[in-house]
Image (cartoon, rainbow, N blue to C red):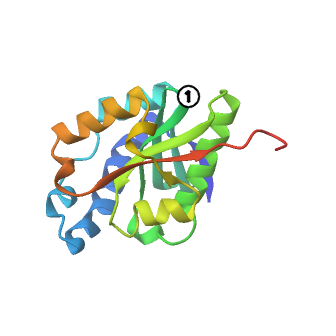
Amino acid sequence: MRIRPATPGELPVLQDIERAAGAPFRDVGMPDIADDEPPALNMLERYRGAGRCWVAALGDRPVAYLIAEPVDDALHVEQVSVHPLAARRGVGRALLAHAAGHAREHGLTALTLTTFADVPWNAPYYTRLGFRALTEPELTPGLRRIRAEEAGHGLDRWPRVCMRADVPRTGA
């Protein structure tokens, strides 16, 4: 497996990965999430063009992707999705480690993300990787904005949480 920047021609493949990764939400009573449309190609291109869209590839074919953007003092993971056929092999962990390296190189102190609190491959998974849930007073202005946008899209029908993992400095 290799982590690398996505190419423009791979963006439709990332949409396919997102659709496949969303399907298991149906099994936990979240069909609206399972049926949610993947990020639009122009949105994926915005992240790719900014150098913050990475794929995990087996051979030449992407099996997972991560998009992120700086938010306050952190690199915010907007989306990380792994195709179910590549799940449980450390692919998501590798993408997050790559994002942490990018954050460190750019002087950012942490990775942040928002996720579903009770879905096993969401908050419990990120906790195992060293993320911690943030309390309401700990939310930065950028995270508050993101949470408000998510609520506007109806994601608060299920419990959600903001999480943060500090990025160790080089040599620390």
Mark 1 residue type? Asp
Q: Residue beneath label 1, please?
A: 73
Query: What residue occupies the far right of the structure in this picture?
Result: 171
How far from the left and from the top, in percent, is residue 70?
A: 50, 28
How far from the left and from the top, in percent, is residue 154?
A: 15, 46
Q: Quadrant of the C terminus?
A: top right
Measuring 36% from the left and 56% from the top, which residue is drawn there?
17
- SS for dot 1: loop
Measuring 40% from the left and 61% from the top, which residue is drawn there?
122
Q: Is residue 147 left or right of residue 91?
A: left
Q: Quadrant of residue 111?
A: top right
How far from the left and from the top, in percent, is residue 169?
A: 76, 39
Q: Quadrant of residue 137?
A: top left
Count of all numbered marks drawn on residues in the image: 1
State the residue in front, 41 or 146.
146
Above or below — where is 9 with respect to 90? above
Local packing at callout 1 (Cα closer than 10 Å; few below 14, some 14-19, many 20+) is: some
How far from the left and from the top, in percent, is residue 144?
A: 34, 33
Q: Is residue 58 left or right of residue 170?
A: left
Above or below — where is 28 with respect to 93? below
Q: Quadrant of residue 19?
A: bottom left
State the residue in front, 93 or 163.
163
Q: Is residue 13 left or right of residue 95?
A: left
Measuring 22% from the left and 74% from the top, which residue is drawn there?
27
State the residue in front, 61 or 40.
40
Q: Quadrant of the N terminus?
A: bottom right
